[in-house]
Image: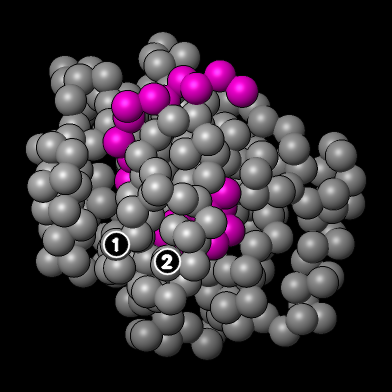
Amino acid sequence: MQMKLIGKIAVVTGGSSGIGFATARALVAQGAHVYITGRSLDALQAAAAVLGAQATPVQGDVADPVQVDALYARVREQHGRVDIVFANAGYAAFAPLGDLSEAHIDGLLSTNIKGVIWTVQKALPLMPAGGSIILSASIVASKGFGNWSVYSATKAAVRSFARTWASDLKGRHIRINAVSPGVIETPGHEKTGATQEQLDGFFDHAASITPLARTGRDAEVAAVVAFLASDDSSFMTGSEIFVDGGVAQV
């Protein structure tokens, strides 16, 4: 593997498991120093132990702008800049129309939308020209899966951010893109509120309609993010890359 990110400083939110952890591992493997964030200190420390000396765990909730400030204060103190931001932290929650609660809506909006805004906006004072911002969207933004309406709407917002922020940042030569994974089996699905039977059915259906007849893998998404983080992707901004069952397309 070519070490294309030597000397780069990266932030990966939601970096202790799933796609975030796989991405942090891919960035470290290519030479970057990666700050991983999450709400569980134990999970972060366990992840950092696997990633090694090139990873720094910082506990925090992206929905709280004060905690995001603390993250970037630490990055500034230790490295003075951030070259790569993967705004990955987010979660899915299952609820049909008719049973939507204020807690359900506010929780998803706070983490999946506000959290992305704070993660990106507060990184900008530390990001030089040539920086790369990658947002974690999802195919649900354009699908009509029942019972996932608010979650799907948050991911549609993330897709929109990639396009509009690309215009906002073009004068600074900072590129911004979104990845929209298909169904990826990660620990996050266990927290959706769906039953195991519902999840199994969902995974089976997703596998049946993908080109490779299987669900996607977190390492496949991580490889796409690592490409977008590298200078090889300097011609891309405002793009959305779909990753579904091992197949990536713009």
Whether residue 83 is visible, yes or no, is yes
Asked whether residue 65 is in view, the answer is no
Query: To which residue does mark 1 refer?
Result: 58
Viewed as shown, does residue 172 lie left or right of 162? left
Observer-nearest residue: 5 or 185?
5
Q: Quadrant of residue 115?
A: bottom left
Callout 1 touching callout 2 (CB < 8 Å): yes
Quarter of the image with the N terminus is: top right
117 part of magenta stretch? no
Q: Secondary structure at mark 2?
A: helix
Magenta region includes residue 6: yes
Residue type for callout 2: Leu
SS category of the residue bearing label 1: strand
Q: For mark 2, what is the residue?
A: 44
- Residue 69 in percent (x, y) is at 13, 58
Quadrant containing the C terminus in the rendered view: top right
Label 2 crowd bin: few (<14), some (14–19), many (20+), radius 10 Å = many
N-term-proximal mark, 1 vs 2 = 2
Image spot of residue 215 (x, y percent): 78, 51
Tell me the residue at 53%/85% (across/down). 98
Q: Is residue 169 left or right of residue 246?
A: left
Q: Quadrant of residue 57?
A: bottom left
Res 168 quadrant in image: top left
The amino acid type, in three-letter code, at marker 1 is Val
- The span shown in magenta is 1-22
Give the percent coordinates (x, y) of residue 100: 47, 83
Q: CA distance from mark 1 to mark 2?
A: 8 Å
